[in-house]
């Protein structure tokens, strides 16, 4: 029998990957021969080969598409399991709304907020209250405590401290209409101190009353002729005993404070005497600050105690 040529019904010489291995027969070794499509000239059948290759490629693509879809389904299933596990229940998170807790079962935001017992801090103590009445103003008082040190600096100006005095009979340390004003409003003490700068001298007088109302009334009753008596001595020449001087009047709490400023040379104070006006204003401001600080110190001590 003449040998069979490939393409004429003889045994397959190639392994088909799409046919199960159990159904394939072992390939028998063949002698190397040229492809024969049945033509007498032994030319390969190129059309048949192309169709076979296209069929194999199509089956491979279908397999890849099917495998990708299966992988997608597996991944989606894993995500669903993770979501359910994170929710802490055996039900999917997109279940019916009837499975959700009612509004009354959901704790409100305010229920988790910490609550504190209401507290009310006491109002801060007013320093002026402690210098407005003799009942509360109990701190020691003297000219050197109210006006400490040996000099006073106000801005760039330095004043030298002179003599001091503490008078229980207030009228005797005043002149003009001021003695009557002090006595009428029951002044209990009149503290005085003198400061100098060159030939300018200022005496500050602080009148002490039992109540703020009495001090305010004394300030209101005073006029241009209500002048505290200047205090000299200790190296300070007499001043404002006959010459024209400049005076001021004010009050804070239970204290009324007065100033008289002039020249130790005996000259009259005029509108051009700016240094005298400045000195009087500085000492009036300093007296106010010292009285207020007295109240602040007592208020601070009361708050700490």
Image (cartoon, rainbow, N blue to C red):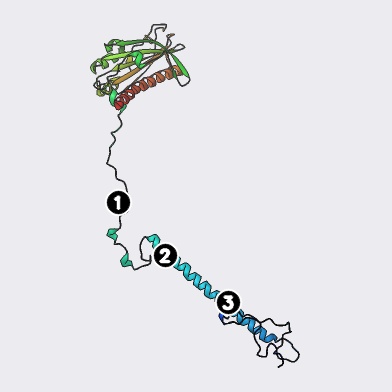
Q: Quadrant of residue 5?
A: bottom right
Q: Residue furthest front?
A: 1
Q: Quadrant of residue 271?
A: top left
Q: Which residue in the structure is indicated by mark 2?
A: 81
User: Around disc 1, counting alpha carbons within 10 Å, would you say few (fewer than 14), some (14 to 19), or many (20 or more)?
Assistant: few
Foreground: disc 2 or disc 1: 2
Residue at point 33%, 67% (across, down): 97
Q: Position of residue 106 (x, y in %)?
A: 30, 58
Depicted 12 relative to depicted 279: above or below: below
140 and 150: which one is in front? 140
Residue farthest right in this picture: 41
Q: Which residue is mark 1?
A: 111
As helix, strand or loop, the secondary structure at mark 2 comes to: helix
Assign a secondary structure to mark 3. Answer: helix
In the picture, measured across the screen, residue 197 lies left or right of residue 58, that is left
On the image, the x and y values in percent for residue 257 come to: 33, 19
Could you tell me how far apart the alpha carbons at marks 3 and 2 are, in whole angstroms?
30 Å
Q: In the figure, is residue 286 to the left or right of 10? A: left
Q: What residue is disc 3 on?
A: 61
Q: Compare residues 72 and 208 and report the one nearer the observer.
A: 72
Q: Is residue 256 shown above or below 73?
A: above
Nearer mark to the viewer, of 3 and 1: 3
Crowd rating for badge 2 (residues with CA inside 10 Å; few <14, some 14–19, many 20+) = some
* Nearest to the observer: residue 237 or residue 176: 237
The x, y position of residue 283, in whole percent, is 39, 18
Q: Where residue 241 sits in the image (x, y, percent)?
A: 37, 9
Mark 1, secondary structure of its residue: helix
- Give the quadrant of residue 54: bottom right
Q: Residue furthest bottom?
A: 1
């Amino acid at each position: 029998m003449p040998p069979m040529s490939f393409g004429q019904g003889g045994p397959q010489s190639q392994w088909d990957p799409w046919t199960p291995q159990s159904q394939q027969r072992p390939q028998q070794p063949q002698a190397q021969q040229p492809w024969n499509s049945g033509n007498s000239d032994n030319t390969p059948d190129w059309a048949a080969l192309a169709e076979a290759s296209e069929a194999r490629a199509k089956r491979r693509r279908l397999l890849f598409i099917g495998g990708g879809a299966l992988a997608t389904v597996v991944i989606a299933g894993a995500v669903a399991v993770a979501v359910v596990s994170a929710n802490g229940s055996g039900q999917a998170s997109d279940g019916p709304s009837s499975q959700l807790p009612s509004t009354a079962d959901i704790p409100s935001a305010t229920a988790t907020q910490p609550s504190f017992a209401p507290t009310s801090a006491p109002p801060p103590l007013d320093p002026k209250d402690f210098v407005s009445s003799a009942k509360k103003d109990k701190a020691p008082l003297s000219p050197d405590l109210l006006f400490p040190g040996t000099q006073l600096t106000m801005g760039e100006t330095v004043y030298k401290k002179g003599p001091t005095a503490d008078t229980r009979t207030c009228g005797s340390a005043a002149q003009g209409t001021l003695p009557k004003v002090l006595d009428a409003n029951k002044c209990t003490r009149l503290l005085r101190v003198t400061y100098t700068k060159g030939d300018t001298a200022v005496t500050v007088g602080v009148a002490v009353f039992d109540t703020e109302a009495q001090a305010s009334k004394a300030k209101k009753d005073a006029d241009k002729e209500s002048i505290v008596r200047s205090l000299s001595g200790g190296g300070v020449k007499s001043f404002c005993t006959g010459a024209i001087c400049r005076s001021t009047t004010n009050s804070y709490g239970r204290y009324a404070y007065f100033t008289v400023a002039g020249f130790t040379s005996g000259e009259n104070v005029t509108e051009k005497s700016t240094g005298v006006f400045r000195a009087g204003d500085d000492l009036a401001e300093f007296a106010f600050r010292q009285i207020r600080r007295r109240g602040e110190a007592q208020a601070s001590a009361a708050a700490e105690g």
